[in-house]
Image (cartoon, rainbow, N blue to C red):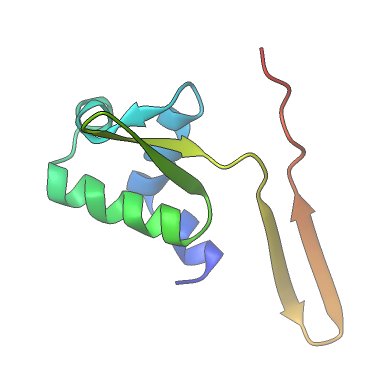
């Protein structure tokens, strides 16, 4: 799945928005974005595979967080290249 397809889902954008505030585990995310576990897990896996999220385990919980840096490259035509790079945010 390419980056635009990944970001074309409202559910995945909601997950990214929620995780921009803090790391969360699946049950917390399900409650925040209002989806069942199977659906949430599917979207989280897509975001991890797409390089937008990473996960880590603490105890029995699997937490998800935004990656530190994301770079998208879009090629509108063979002659041109369009690059969007989001700078790393400072920690508060």
Query: Residue at position x 21%, y 32% from top?
Result: 60
Query: Residue at position x 76%, y 50% from top?
Result: 85
Picture coordinates of residue 66 (x, y %)? Answer: 52, 38
Q: Nearer the viewer, residue 80 or 64?
A: 64
Picture coordinates of residue 76 (x, y %)? Answer: 73, 76
Query: Residue at position x 44%, y 30% from top?
Result: 19
In the depicted structure, whether residue 23 falls above or below residue 10:
above
Query: Residue at position x 38%, y 47% from top?
Result: 12
Most extreme residue toward the front is 59
Residue 8 seen in render: no
Most extreme residue toward the bottom is 78
Picture coordinates of residue 2 (x, y %)? Answer: 51, 70
Picture coordinates of residue 70 (x, y %)? Answer: 65, 49
In the depicted structure, whether residue 86 falls above or below residue 46:
above
Q: Quadrant for the C terminus, please.
A: top right
Q: Nearer the viewer, residue 19 or 79?
A: 19
Q: Quadrant for the N terminus, please.
A: bottom left
Q: Is residue 61 left or right of residue 22?
A: left
Most extreme residue toward the right is 79
Residue 82 seen in render: yes
Q: Is residue 25 left or right of residue 39?
A: right
Q: Is residue 60 left or right of residue 76?
A: left
User: Number of numbered discs present?
Assistant: 0
């Amino acid at each position: 799945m390419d980056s635009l397809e990944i970001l074309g889902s409202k559910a995945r954008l909601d997950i990214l928005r929620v995780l921009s505030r803090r790391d969360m585990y699946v049950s917390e995310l399900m409650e925040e974005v209002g989806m069942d576990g199977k659906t949430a897990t599917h979207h989280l896996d897509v975001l991890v595979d797409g390089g937008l999220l990473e996960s880590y385990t603490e105890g029995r919980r699997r937490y998800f967080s935004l990656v530190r840096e994301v770079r998208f490259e879009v090629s509108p035509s063979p002659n041109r290249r369009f690059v969007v790079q989001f700078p790393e945010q400072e920690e508060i």
